[in-house]
Image: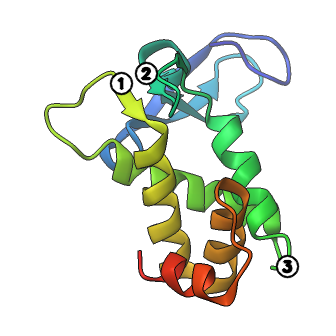
Amino acid sequence: MKCIYCNGKTKVTNTRPREKEHSTWRRRQCLNCHAIVTSEEAVKLDECLLVKKKNGEQEPFLRDKLFISIFQSIDHLPDQIRTAHYLCETILRHCLKAKPMLPLLSSENISITAIRVLKNFDAASAIKYNSYRTNLKLPNDVRRALKF
């Protein structure tokens, strides 16, 4: 990897696996300007995971799609971007927990996992997220949605 400041070569000075996030954290030092930077190596989920939609079609997993839906659901909370990032990481960790891991996730399973994580974090966000994927029109619909 090249230094972001001077484009010189870097050496790895510290490495730590982050098993929960399926990534590796690395501390690097530039051999030229001696700047220290941190990098993270992660699996490209869009290249190795597929999502099976309700209509049976399959598409590559896009973390950004999950992020946007979470971001919209928590728009009433402070620090929306950082919170959405951490919520997405938690949802993905739960979705990828199954062993052996299959390369096909169902959109329904992703949604149910997202609702459970959001419900533990903020009930209003869970309701808002669920309202995007279903028709929550009556009070009974909302009560049923909260029983997830």
**Residue holding disc 2:** 49
**Crowding at mark 2 (Cα within 10 Å: few <14, some 14-19, many 20+):** some
Q: Which mark is first along the chain, 2 or 3? A: 2
Which residue: 67% across, 64% down? Answer: 129
Which mark sits nearer the N-terminus, 1 or 2?
A: 2
Element at badge 2? loop
Marks 1 and 2, Cα distance to the nearest angstrom?
6 Å
Label 1 residue SS: strand
Left or right: 18 as drawn, with respect to 10: left
Image coordinates of residue 86 in percent, x first then y, are 59, 60
User: Is residue 129 something one can see in this rendering?
Assistant: yes
Which residue is identified by label 1? 104
* Alpha carbons under labels 3 and 1: distance apart: 33 Å
Cβ atoms at labels 1 and 2 below 8 Å apart: yes
Residue 18 sits in quarter: top left
At which x and y percent is residue 60?
55, 18
- Residue occupied by mark 3: 76
Q: Amino acid at mark 1?
A: Leu
Q: Nearer the viewer, residue 95 or 13?
A: 95
Residue at the (48%, 69%) spot, across then down: 117
Number of on-image labels? 3
Q: Amino acid under label 3?
A: His
The image quadrant of residue 2 is top right
* Residue at image coords 63%, 65%: 130
- The quadrant of the picture occupied by the C terminus is bottom left
Q: Is residue 37 visible?
A: no
Considering only vertical position in the picture, is 34 above or below 87? above
Colouring used for the render: rainbow
**Residue ID at (21%, 43%):** 98
Please indicate whether residue 64 sits to the left or right of residue 43 in the image. right
* Label 3 neighbour load within 10 Å: few <14, some 14-19, many 20+: few
